[in-house]
Amino acid sequence: MRLISISDTHNKHKDLDIPKGDFLIHCGDFTEGGSRSETLDFLEWFSKQPHKHKILIGGNHDFFLEKYQHNLEEYIPNNIHYLNDKGITLENIKIWGSPYTPGNGHWAFNLERGRAIRKRWNLIPQNIDILVTHTPPYGILDESQTYKNIGCEELLKQIVDIKPTLHLFGHVHDDFGKKNIGPTLFVNSAVMDNKMRLINAISTIDL
């Protein structure tokens, strides 16, 4: 079974050459300004991709999803699984998705480090196979050229506890790649570099 993971496409989704696979997962920041028109354009494109299972979470740029998070049924096509602190089981694979990133609250799905964001990670069940977040965990594929490690410390603590098989994320354009640590494969799926160029490869994982 092949899983395709992308993140941080920032309105450039139509310029991507998406490989074939069973799952297509977007780890957030599919818009730049988070407007309604950007969001609907992406959702239309995403829904037309041929992959059997399409999974989506928001990111810190995706303001429309946050603003209308209690009324999204009319916007998100039925063949897209949108996960906001929510889980789903597909092909006997348990998946959990959450859009939150640590920050000062000026961005979408942004919570202060410590107790505020820890409440979100505490919702993640113990028995999941794949975790999809926008932020990386602290110290793992999270090095920004400007701020060094910007991942979430509280998320790292939760991952150490629950030990998912696969953790997919994006957010940090400078640290694209894959890393095996213990039982978990970590994948930063950001397709853009820090100059917003589509030069990173699309992440492919065979399950």
Image (cartoon, helix red, strand yellow):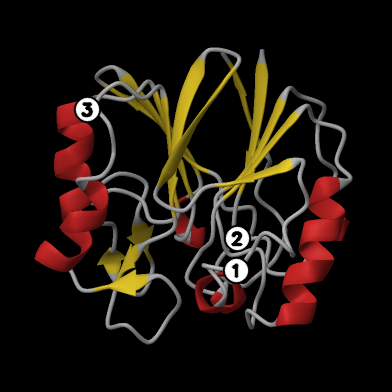
- Mark sitting earlier along the chain (1/3): 1
Whole-angstrom CA distance, mark 3 to mark 2, is 26 Å
Q: Quadrant where the N terminus lies?
A: top right
Residue for point 30% across, 21% down: 127
Q: Residues within 10 Å of mark 1 (few under 14, many from 20)?
A: few
Identity of the amino acid at label 1? Asn
Label 1 SS: loop
Residue 162, label in figure = 3
Q: Residues within 10 Å of mark 3 (few under 14, many from 20)?
A: some
- In terms of image quadrants, where is residue 114? bottom left
- In terms of image quadrants, where is residue 189? top right
Give the x, y percent position of residue 43.
77, 59
Can you say whether 157 is above or below 88 in the image? below
Q: Residues within 10 Å of mark 2 (few under 14, many from 20)?
A: many
Would you name the residue on which mark 1 appears? Answer: 71
C-beta proximity under 8 Å, tags 1 and 3: no
Residue for point 34% across, 57% down: 143
Residue pushed farthest left?
A: 115
- Mark sitting earlier along the chain (3/2): 2
Give the x, y percent position of residue 152.
24, 56
Relative placement, left or right, of 16 versus 72 is right
Would you name the residue on which mark 2 appears? Answer: 8
